[in-house]
Image: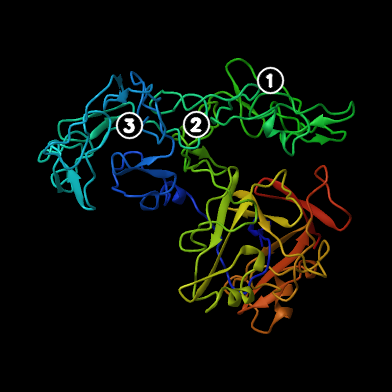
C-alpha cells in the first residue's frame, strides 16, 4: 500500500466534512458604498453603509465628502459645513458671494429664496419649490436622472461628485473619488487628495495616517512593513526571520539546493545570468509562469498574476478580496454559514463546512456541537449544521497554540484545535474521519495522519484482524464499513530525521515521522 496515500486531519468529526476554501465570494460584498448611486433620502437612516444624506440634494452621498468652496466666500460647502460667513449688513447669494444691503422680495412667491439670502418659505412634504417660487410635485420628471435640471420643473435632479461630469441625459460620468477609508494621500480613482496627516504622522501606502512604526506589532526585528522603518535588531547569535521575529542559532540547510534561501536568511547560491532559481532551489534555463487559479501575486518567474482593484488586497490564496476585521479562529461569512459575521483580516482565509444532511440535523446552533468542533463556530442553517472560521497559513508546517496544521487544497492551513485532555503521543491512534473515531486528538504539536478505508482494496469481512494482512500493527489499523484504514499521531522531522522507531516521509512538501512497520 503506497505511503503517498497518507492524508492529514486536524480534529475528529462524526462525518466526512470536506472543508473547502471560500474563494472570490467576498468580491460581492453586501453593504459596500455605491459611489455612483443616487438613492433618494430625507435623513441619514435612509442611506447605506459609510453614506450620509445630502439634504441640499435629497440623495445619499459617501461620507468621504470633498468640500466645494472654490470661488465661494460664504454659504454651504456641500459637506454639511460652511464656506464662510458674510459681514454684518451683507447677505450670501446662491453663488456663495457676499452682497451688500438687500431688500427681500417674496411677492407672488410662497417658497424658495427671497433674493437676499433668506427664504420665502418651505413646501410641504412631498412637494418641491419651482424656480418661480411655487410649491409643486416632487421632481416628477427626474426619474432615472441623477444630475442637471428637471425637464419639467426646472429644479435640480442632483449634482455629480468632483471629477465627474453631467451628460445631457442627466447621468454622472467620469472618475469619481474613491477614498473610502483612506484619510491621506492621493485618491486612487480621481487623483484628488484624500487628506493630509498631522505633523509627525506619515501617510502609509494604504492611505492611513500613522504614528512611528505602526506595523511593528508582534515584530521585533527587520523593516516595518508600513513605513519602512526598522522594528529592531537581533542579538549577535540570533537572526531575523520573515515574520520579524528573532530566532536562535540557525543551521543553514542547502541539501539538494543550488540557489535560493538556506533557511537562515542566507543563500544557497546564485544562478547564471541566463538562469533562474525555481521553488526547489534548482537553477533552470527557462521559466514557465504559473497563474493557474490565481488573480494576483507572483507568477513564479519574477512576474505578477495581476493586481487587485483599489481597496482590495491579495490574500494567501492569490485571490483579490476586501480586507475584513475577523481574526484567526473567529467566524466568517462562508456561503450560507455564519452570514453577517464579516470577512477575515488580510492574510487569513475563510474556511468552512457547508450544511449537509449527512453531518447532522439541528434546530439550534447548540445542537451542532455534537457533530462539529465547537471551536469551528457551528451554525444551524436550514435544519442542518455548518461551520466557518478564519485560518492563517502554517509557518514552516507549524501553527500557534490553539491551532493545528491541516492541508487544504495543497496549502498548509492552521485549524482551530480542541485540546484533548488525554492527547495522543507519536504513534498513538487518533480520530481521522471515521478511522479510530473514538481515539481522540493528538498533542497540539503533532499531526494526525491517516489512510481512508477501502472495502475493494483492503477488505475486512471478519473485523480489525483482517487489516493486519494489509497494514502493520504500528499504524493502528481499523476496520470501518468493510474496509481497512489506519491513523496515528506524527511529529515533524528534525533536520530530516526522526526518533527511534519512526522513519521520515514527505507529505505535500513537508517531512513527517511515520511508525516503522
User: What is the count of numbered marks?
Assistant: 3
In this figure, which residue is indicated by the disc labeled 1? 270
Q: Quadrant of the C terminus?
A: bottom right
Disc 2, SS: loop
Task: Report helix, strand or loop for mark 3.
Answer: loop
Left or right of 385 in this view: 436: right
| Place of residue 187 in the rendered image (x, y in percent of width and height, measured from the top left) | 44, 27
Q: Residue furthest bottom?
A: 462
Disc 1 versus disc 3: nearer the observer: 3
In this view, the residue in front, 223 or 478, is 223
Q: Which residue is mark 2?
A: 289
Contact flag, marks 1 and 2 (Cβ < 8 Å): no
Residue under numbered circle 3: 161
Residue drawn at (60%, 75%) of the image: 366
Question: In front: 281, or 94?
Answer: 94
Distance between mark 3 and mark 2 Cα atoms:
41 Å
Spatial CA distance of label 1 from label 2 is 20 Å
Sequence-wise, which precedes: disc 1 or disc 3? 3
Residue at left offset 22%, top offset 34%: 113
Question: Residue 266's image quarter?
Answer: top right
**Residue 75 drawn above or below residue 71:** below
**Residue 491: quadrant of the picture:** bottom right
In the image, what residue occupies the spot 82% across and 42% down? Answer: 495
Amino acid at each position: 500500500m503506497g505511503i503517498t496515500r497518507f492524508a492529514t486531519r486536524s480534529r475528529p468529526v462524526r462525518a466526512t466534512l470536506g472543508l473547502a476554501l471560500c474563494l472570490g465570494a467576498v468580491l460581492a460584498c453586501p453593504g459596500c458604498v455605491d459611489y455612483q448611486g443616487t438613492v433618494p433620502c430625507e435623513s441619514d437612516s435612509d442611506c447605506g453603509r459609510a453614506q450620509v444624506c445630502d439634504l441640499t440634494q435629497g440623495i445619499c452621498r459617501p461620507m468621504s465628502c470633498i468640500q466645494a468652496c472654490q470661488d465661494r466666500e460664504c454659504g454651504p460647502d456641500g459637506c454639511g459645513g460652511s464656506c464662510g460667513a458674510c459681514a454684518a449688513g451683507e447677505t450670501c447669494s446662491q453663488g456663495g458671494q457676499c452682497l451688500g444691503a438687500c431688500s427681500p422680495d417674496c411677492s407672488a412667491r410662497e417658497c424658495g429664496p427671497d433674493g437676499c439670502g433668506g427664504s420665502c418659505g418651505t413646501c410641504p412634504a412631498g412637494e418641491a419649490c419651482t424656480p418661480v417660487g411655487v410649491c409643486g410635485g416632487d421632481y416628477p420628471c427626474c426619474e432615472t436622472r441623477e444630475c442637471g435640471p428637471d425637464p419639467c420643473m426646472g429644479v435640480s435632479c442632483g449634482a455629480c461628485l468632483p471629477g465627474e461630469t453631467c451628460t445631457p441625459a442627466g447621468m454622472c460620468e467620469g472618475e469619481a473619488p474613491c477614498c473610502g477609508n483612506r484619510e491621506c494621500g492621493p485618491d486612487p480613482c480621481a487623483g484628488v487628495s484624500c487628506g493630509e496627516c498631522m505633523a509627525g504622522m506619515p501617510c502609509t501606502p494604504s492611505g492611513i495616517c500613522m504614528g512611528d512604526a505602526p506595523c511593528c506589532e508582534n515584530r521585533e526585528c527587520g523593516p516595518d512593513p508600513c513605513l519602512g522603518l526598522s522594528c529592531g535588531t537581533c542579538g549577535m547569535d540570533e537572526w531575523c526571520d520573515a515574520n520579524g521575529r528573532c530566532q536562535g542559532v540557525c543551521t543553514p540547510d542547502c541539501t539538494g539546493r543550488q540557489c535560493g534561501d538556506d533557511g537562515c536568511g542566507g543563500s544557497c547560491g546564485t544562478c547564471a545570468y541566463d538562469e533562474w532559481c525555481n521553488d526547489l532551489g534548482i537553477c533552470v534555463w527557462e521559466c514557465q509562469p504559473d497563474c493557474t487559479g490565481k488573480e494576483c501575486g507572483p507568477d513564479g518567474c519574477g512576474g505578477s498574476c495581476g493586481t487587485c482593484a483599489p481597496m482590495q488586497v491579495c490574500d494567501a490564496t492569490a485571490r483579490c478580496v476586501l480586507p475584513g476585521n475577523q481574526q484567526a479562529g473567529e467566524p466568517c461569512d462562508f456561503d450560507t454559514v455564519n452570514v453577517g459575521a464579516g470577512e477575515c483580516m488580510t492574510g487569513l482565509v475563510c474556511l468552512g463546512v457547508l450544511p449537509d444532511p449527512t453531518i447532522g440535523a439541528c434546530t439550534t446552533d447548540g445542537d451542532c456541537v455534537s457533530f462539529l468542533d465547537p471551536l469551528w463556530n457551528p451554525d444551524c442553517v436550514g435544519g442542518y449544521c455548518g461551520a466557518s472560521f478564519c485560518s492563517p497559513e502554517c509557518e514552516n508546517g507549524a501553527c500557534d497554540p490553539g491551532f493545528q496544521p491541516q492541508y487544504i487544497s495543497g496549502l498548509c492551513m492552521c485549524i482551530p484545535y480542541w485540546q484533548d485532555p488525554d492527547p495522543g503521543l507519536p504513534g498513538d491512534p487518533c480520530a481521522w474521519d471515521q478511522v479510530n473515531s473514538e481515539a481522540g486528538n493528538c498533542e497540539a504539536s503533532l499531526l494526525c495522519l491517516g489512510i481512508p478505508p477501502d472495502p475493494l482494496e483492503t477488505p475486512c469481512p471478519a473485523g480489525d484482524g483482517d487489516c493486519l494482512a494489509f497494514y502493520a500493527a504500528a499504524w493502528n489499523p481499523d476496520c470501518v464499513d468493510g474496509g481497512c484504514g489506519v491513523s496515528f499521531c506524527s511529529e515533524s522531522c528534525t533536520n530530516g530525521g526522526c526518533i527511534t522507531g519512526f522513519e521520515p516521509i514527505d507529505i505535500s512538501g513537508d517531512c513527517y515521522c511515520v511508525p516503522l512497520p
